[in-house]
Amino acid sequence: MTVALKGPSAMALTAGILLLSRSRSFGMPLDVEIVGDPATVSPVRGPAIVHAPVLASCGVGRDLGSGALVIVPGPAAEPLAISLAEDGADGWFLADRAGDGQTPASRAFVALSRSPDPVQRALGRQLRDALAALGCPAEPALIDLLCGAPVSPLDRVGLVLRAGQGMTGSTRASLTHLLEPVVDSLPDPLPAGLDGAELARAREDGRLARLLGRARLRVRDRVEDWLEGMRATDPAGRFDPLVCGLVEVGSHVAGLPAHAVLPPLAPAADAVAMGLGTALGAGEGEADANRSLIAMFRFLGGRFVDDARYPVELAFASPPEDRLQRWRWFCRATRQAADTADALWRQVVDPVQ
């Protein structure tokens, strides 16, 4: 029996691979053809990291022992595309790989560490030492994750600690043991999108002092000294994205009870965090996810043809130009292709009479 598929490249390729894989596992003779020219397949370029069981089962960016984690390599100068959602259906964002920073916060972090002013460099060193004490290397990508990932602030903290554990092999640090117990109500976190003006108001009305009061004395002294040093050395607010991003996230940690635990990460987000170090350095291998699908389809015996008498039409939107939107389109198409392959397989095995 022959099944001919016609439709968007990612969807047709994925459905074809899954049909061929299943037919081989059951020992059933099945040929799969795709109508179209593989040279016209839209590229989906790395670097990227996502937890996607469908893509991993089709051989895209998978290493043995990594489960459903997909890491597609790419040029070192290109930022890393990341999705924390299962199957990459949503939540795509970029993180730095070149060491220059991707978000305003990470660019400010790099600028602080490279500043010609020795006082600013010393403040940068203090921040790097604080990250190291939490088991996190001084990677701009971690600042991108902490200040730019499209998840809740506490989830961002958990992601950074987990990513640091994956990069360094250290034991996951606890933040809440640095907090003092409270006898009255917990302080409210500062608002999302905190900027320099709102931070100044929080200083004036006592909100910042109340948040800092949650930290144990030795921690509070160091944080206060660092914040005052940043304010004194940066009257123009050049480093505000970094300072405000850290204070905003820290205010959510300060709102936790003493000895509480951070909320557990979703399995997909946890896998991405643990694989982040590998993805940041991935430069070897196929950098186009669609080309990996083509190679697997051909390896399993699939063919490309110019025409077919009764092709199965697979309807899906055309690929967008934006890189993150294309990855989102690609992952959604492959996920839908898995459902399509299941339906086609039932028709092959038990066709309606």
Image: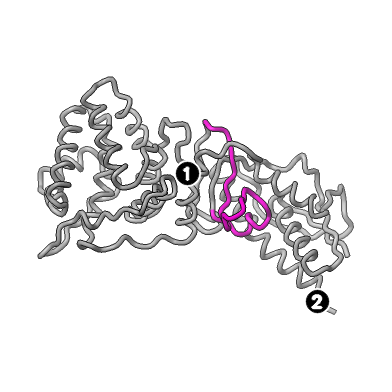
Select label 1 or label 2 by which is in front. Answer: 1
Return the residue at label 2.
350
Q: Mark 2: which secondary structure?
A: loop
Q: Amino acid at mark 2?
A: Asp
Compared across the picture, whether 214 is left or right of 53 comes to left
Q: Position of residue 139 (x, y in %)?
A: 39, 38
Question: In which quadrant is the N terminus drawn?
Answer: bottom right
* Coloration mode: one colour
Residue drawn at the location 36% of the way across and 35% of the way down: 104
Residue 275 counted in the magenta span:
no
Residue drawn at the location 51% of the way across and 44% of the way down: 278
Return the residue at label 1.
277
Q: Position of residue 61 (x, y in %)?
A: 62, 48
Tell me: residue 154, above or below residue 111.
below
Residue drawn at the location 40% of the way across and 50% of the way down: 165
Compared across the picture, whether 70 is left or right of 175 comes to right
Part of the protein shown in magenta: 51-77
Q: Position of residue 115 (x, y in %)?
A: 29, 24
Judge by depth and name the residue closer to the eye, 320 or 100.
100
Compared across the picture, whether 247 is left or right of 304 comes to left
Judge by depth and name the residue closer to the eye, 87 or 190.
87
Q: Amino acid at mark 1?
A: Gly
The disc, 1 or 2, on the residue closer to the chain's N-terminal end is 1
Tell me: residue 275, above or below residue 139.
below
